Amino acid sequence: MSRTFKENMQAFAVKQVLNYFDEDPDKSLPKILRWAEKFDKEGNLAHLIKPFYAVLDDPNNNWNILIKSLWTDIDPAVRKVFFENFIVNATFIGTTQQDKLKKAHDCNVPWAILMDLTSACNLKCTGCWAADYGPKLNLDYDELDDIINQGTEMGTYMYIYSGGEPLVRKDDIIRLCEAHPDCMFLAFTNGTLIDEKFANELLRVKNFVPAISIEGFEEATDYRRGKGTYRKVMDAMSILKEKKLLFGASCCYTSKNIDSLSSEEYIDMLIDSGAKFAWFFHYMPVGNEAVPELLPLPEQREIMYRKIREYRKSKSIFTIDFQNDGEYVNGCIAGGCSYLHINANGDIEPCAFIHYADSNIRTHTLLEAYKRPLFMAYKKRKPFNDNMLRPCPMLENPECLCDMVKSADAYSTDMQSPEDVEDLYAKCKPYADRWTPKAEELWAASHRC
C-alpha cells in the first residue's frame, strides 16, 4: 500500500526529529517533547507527554536519570531506531491507524501482537504452561512474516515473541528484524542462549529488545529454572550491557520468590546490570500440570502492589506490574484491546494465559479473528470489574472467562492435555475469593474522594 501525502510528511518529520538524538539530552529532550505535542494533534497522549516537563526540570528525579541514561548507556543508532519504531510508529502513527479500523469494523485492533515462534525450550521451569504444548510446534518464517504484514497494514508495529524459548529461532528472529525495519521486536527469553555473536547481530539490526526472565537472586531463579541458570542470565546481561544494547527483565512473582523479587536489592541489581525496564507478572495456574501452590497469597500480592509503586518514585528503571497496574491501562489489555497471543500451533488466543480460541492464523486472517465471537466477547464485556485491582477475566473474575469461552464455543488450545474451562475456573475461584477483600481495601484506600 503506497503512502499518502500526510504519511510522507509524517515520515519527513520523524527524520528531522531524529537529529535531536545526536544532541546533548538537556537540549534535545525539551525539543522532543514539543515535537510530540505538535504531532499528537488530537491530544490523545497529552496525559503522557505533559508530566515529562516537570521530570526534566528536576535533575535528581529518577525518571530524569533513567531517560538520560539512554544517551550514556545505549548505542546511539539503537536509541534512534527505538524512538522511531516504538515511539513514533507503534505509539503515534500506529494508534491512529488502529483507531480508524476500530471504528470502521467495530472490533478491537491491538497495539501489540505476542507470538510463539516455537514450543521448544532448552529449560523446563516449574509451573510453566508453555511446555504443555509439546516440543515440536512452530510457526514457520513465512507465517510469521505474513502475521507482521497483516498487522502493520492495521497499524500494529509492536511484535513480541514468547515460547517455548524464542531464541531457539535466532536466525528467523534476525531475518524478521531485517524484513520489517519499521517494527519494534521484543522477546521474553530465559537469556541462556544470548552470546556475543547474537548481541552483535542485535547491534546490526537495532530493532530487537530482549526481556530476560529472572526470578530473583540465584536461589529463587535456579529453584524454578534449574541449577546454573542464574549465572547464565547474569552473563547474558553483562554482554548486552557491554554492547550498549537496550534490554530489560521479565519477572514472574510466585509464593516462593516474593521476598527476593520485591526487595530493593533485587531492583538495584537489575539497574546495575543495565536493565532499563522490568515487567512483573503474576504466576497463573494455567494447564493441567499447573502448581496452584505457587499462587501468591493476598498479603504477598499486596507487597508487590506497594513495592512497585514505591520503586517508581525512587528507582531509575521503568516498571510495570501487569496484575496490579490495571488502572493505568483500563483493566485487562487482552482480547485484542491492546494485545493478543498467537501460539506455536497458530491458534489466535486472547492472552498468553488464556488457552482458548475460536480461530487460527492458518484458516483466518487477523481481522477475521478480531471480529469472531471470542474477541468480540472481550470487547463487549471489558472491563470485567470496576475495581482495576481485579482486572483479569481468568484469575480474579473466572466466571467471566467461563461465560465467554462457552458463548463463543471456543476450544482448548493445549495440544498435550486440553483443559476444560470449568477445571480452570475451579483453580482460580478460590484465589479470586481470597483476593477480593484485599483488592477492595486497597482500591478504596487509593481512590478516596
Image: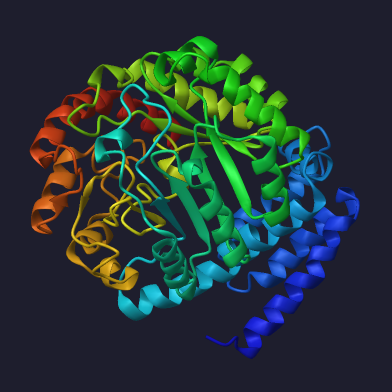
Quadrant of the drawing holding the C terminus:
top left
Which residue does the image show at 75% across and 67% down from the upper left? Answer: 35
x then y, percent, for residue 419: 14, 38
Q: Nearer the viewer, residue 289 or 263?
A: 289
Q: Nearer the viewer, residue 111 or 245?
A: 245
Which residue does the image show at 61% across and 26% down from the upper left? Answer: 311
Using the image, determine if residue 297 lies above or below residue 95: above
Using the image, determine if residue 99 lies above or below residue 384: below
Which residue does the image show at 41% across and 27% down from the upper left? Answer: 123
The colour style of the image is rainbow
- Quadrant of residue 196 in the image? top right
Asked if residue 357 shows in the view, the reply is: yes
Q: Is residue 31 left or right of residue 425?
A: right
Which residue does the image show at 85% across and 64% down from the upper left? Answer: 19
x then y, percent, for residue 313: 64, 30
x then y, percent, for residue 122: 43, 31
Q: Nearer the viewer, residue 264 or 150?
A: 150
Using the image, determine if residue 366 lies above or below residue 228: below
Q: Is residue 5 left or right of residue 154?
A: right
Asked if residue 180 shows in the view, the reply is: no
- Count the numbered circles shown: 0
Q: Is residue 271 left or right of residue 25?
A: left
